[in-house]
Image (tube, grey):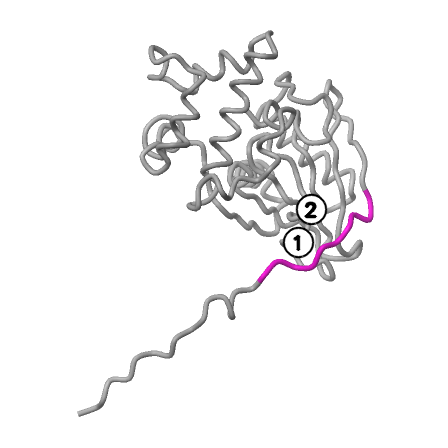
Amino acid sequence: MERYSPPPTISSSANRRGLFHENEPFAHGWLPTGGPHEIFYEECGNPDGKPCVILHGGPGGAINPTMRRFFDPSKWRMALFDQRGCGKSRPNASLDDNTTWSLIDDIERLRIHLGVEKWTVFGGSWGSTLALAYAITHPQRVEGIVLRGVFLLTQRELKWFYQDGASILFPDAWARFCAPIPEAERGDMISAFHKRLTHKDRRIQGEAAQAWSQWEGDTISIRGPEARPSKFNEIDFAIAFA
């Protein structure tokens, strides 16, 4: 009779790979779109490396220095850009000519501008939806796809996150999210927020934007509000994000 020996204990912290080292862009600029928007972009890593484009979440989340650390900067030529209406792209928080298909055009416009034939497309959260939409539209330009935190904006996902589902996991954060919305309108939170986020009164717009942005920040991790990035509290970021 063989004696059972349990498998060795593996320390997850000892074996977990961290992000690559911090690095600064070697190029940046604003890319005209032929319309009201100018897209801010930057390139990081190895100018002669394997090309990839990194798509941020949100929509409206903007790029940040941490995103430069997802790929080995000695081997990859990373292109990052702020999607329309957010980050350093101009004008800020604009919804004019700002659709999924406009953003797909921007990705392709950036690829051509940078002289890239094919690249790996990386996206997280909303960026995963955009990555898939771009790959479906321009398959001949995509060498590979890497997705994280997949959120495809299906009606089921939207209802779970903004109406009934995540509210059970984060009841305190949900109460703060609901605060700007009268009870009579809480049966459709997305529509109720949209009405206020597009309001001409910046006070009303700002109050709704902060509630929306903080809800997103409070639910970014299972740890809840303690994990909320500080930028989610900034009013200009909140309005663009929301």
Residue type marked 1: Arg
Q: Quadrant of residue 175?
A: top left
74 vs 6, nearest the viewer: 6
Residue 23 on the magenta span:
yes
Local SS, label 2: helix
Residue type marked 2: Pro
Q: Quadrant of residue 152?
A: top left
Image: magenta residue range: 18-27
Reading the image, the residue beneath label 2 is 65
Label pair 2/1, CB-CB below 8 angstroms:
yes
Residue drawn at x 34%, y 38% is: 169
Residue 44: percent from the left, percent from the top? 75, 50
Query: Distance between the Cα atoms at labels 2 and 1?
Result: 7 Å
122 vs 57, nearest the viewer: 57
Residue drawn at x 49%, y 11% is: 195
143 versus 237 height, above or below: below
